[in-house]
Image (cartoon, helix red, strand yellow):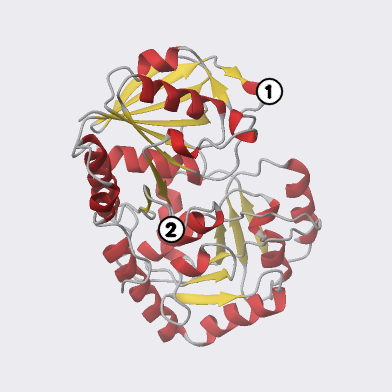
Amino acid sequence: MNVAHLIPALFGPSGIVGGAERYVFELARHMAVNVPTTLVTFGDENREETIDQLRVCVIGRPWHIRAQSTNAFALRVFRTLAHADVVHCHQQHILVSSLVAVWCRATGRSVFVTDLGGGGWDISAYVSTDRLYHGHLHLSEYSRRVFGHNGRPRVHVIGGGVDTTRFRPSSDGRRDGPVRFVGRGLPHKGVDALIRSVSPEIPREVIGPAPNAAFLGDLELLAVGKNVRFRNVVSDSQLVAAYQQARCVVLPSVYRTMYGQETAVPELLGQTLLEAMACGAPVICTTVASLPEIVKHGVTGLIVRPNNPAELRSAIQWLRNHPEAGRAMGTAGRDWVLRQFAWPAVVARCVEIYRGSRRGASSLAVQKANVWDPGTS
């Protein structure tokens, strides 16, 4: 069985950026240990490379549908996927996924999809494309529910994954760094609440790219006179060190942004929380979307209401005043990730579902695969 993963987001000169791209890359990289796997994406120039056992094919100079940067298409995609028995599309509501799904059906290939949120112009704006795919593989129970797939056949939750060898606690166990946010600087991440929660004795650090320059400017204005640092670019090793040294890691996502805009689907997974827990950091998140599936309140971290800087400040202060409890949460978080979110387990779920489709198994048999149960302890 040859597997190809297709993701439309651009790979720029600096390589992989953002949680969605990292998720797909790591899933494909770990899958390549078990079955021949190719990652197909789009970028500025055609190129191919091998990373560990994973073949990466970048299709250069694609056509961007309606000038949407993450809605790319090129006819070359069909030639690039020709070797695959199974194609796993990562993003449903874009034109390339719909066209590739039709092509897979016509040529006898199995095709699956994982929705990472967002999207662009596609035929799915006019007619449902759900039935084009042999299976929908969701990141969380929240994702399955919000996309209206509860109770449907051929729908599975595969969960998130973490490289627990790379993301691990430091040997010295020190946690004297600032409270950190890691992620893209977008309004629905609620970073403004983190900045508003600042107290003089506990610094904050915001790590990650800021695609919206106006929003970054507003955050910097909020941070004037406060103990807040911004780092837009970090290497992989610096990211791991940031998690390892953080007093705690906060993902304060919101449904309603500081501008009053509503975000219907703000978090399908919460990848940075998983990475932080793998590094033994206690975490704080909000009661938003999938995040309560990731964090067990009082066990691996704390959960607060969104858009509530005072409550967030109190949670951070509580961890500062109870360092032993914080360390216990970090240990429990690492154990939780090792049991449920290590990449080999996620790969095994996917491969079993792929093989069930290739065998022509019934949907009932496929549902008996070792699919992640967020309620399992």
> Does residue 64 appear left or right of residue 50 in this picture?
right
Q: Residue at x 61, y 74 (%)?
A: 202
Q: Position of residue 1 (x, y in %)?
A: 20, 30
Q: Residue at x 37, y 68 (%)?
A: 280
Give whichever of discs 2 and 1 has the lower sequence position: 1
Q: Which three-letter amino acid code belongs to the residue tagged 1?
A: Ala
Q: Which residue is mark 2?
A: 151
Rate crowding at label 1 as few (under 14), some (14 to 19) or many (20 or more) other CA atoms within 10 Å: few
Is residue 269 visible to us here? no
Q: Which three-letter amino acid code belongs to the residue tagged 2?
A: Gly
Q: Nearer the viewer, residue 161 or 263?
A: 263
Is residue 346 visible to us here? yes
Q: Nearer the viewer, residue 68 or 22?
A: 68
> Does residue 167 appear left or right of residue 188 in this picture?
left
> Does residue 35 appear left or right of residue 260 in this picture?
left
How many marks on residues?
A: 2
Q: Position of residue 57 (x, y in %)?
A: 38, 21
The image quarter containing residue 327 is bottom left
For the C terminus, the quadrant is: bottom left
Q: Residue at x 54, y 14 (%)?
A: 61
The image quarter containing residue 4 is top left
Label 2 to label 1: alpha-carbon separation: 36 Å
Q: Is label 2 or label 1 in front?
A: 2
Q: Position of residue 39 (x, y in %)?
A: 36, 29
* Element assignment for label 2: loop
Q: Which mark is residue 67?
A: 1
Q: Position of residue 124 (x, y in %)?
A: 59, 34
- Above-or-below relation of 63 to 39: above
Rate crowding at label 2 as few (under 14), some (14 to 19) or many (20 or more) other CA atoms within 10 Å: few
The image quarter containing residue 117 is top right
Q: Residue at x 45, y 52 (%)?
A: 239
The answer to whether the residue labelled 2 contacts the one labelled 1, judged by CB atoms less than 8 Å apart, is no
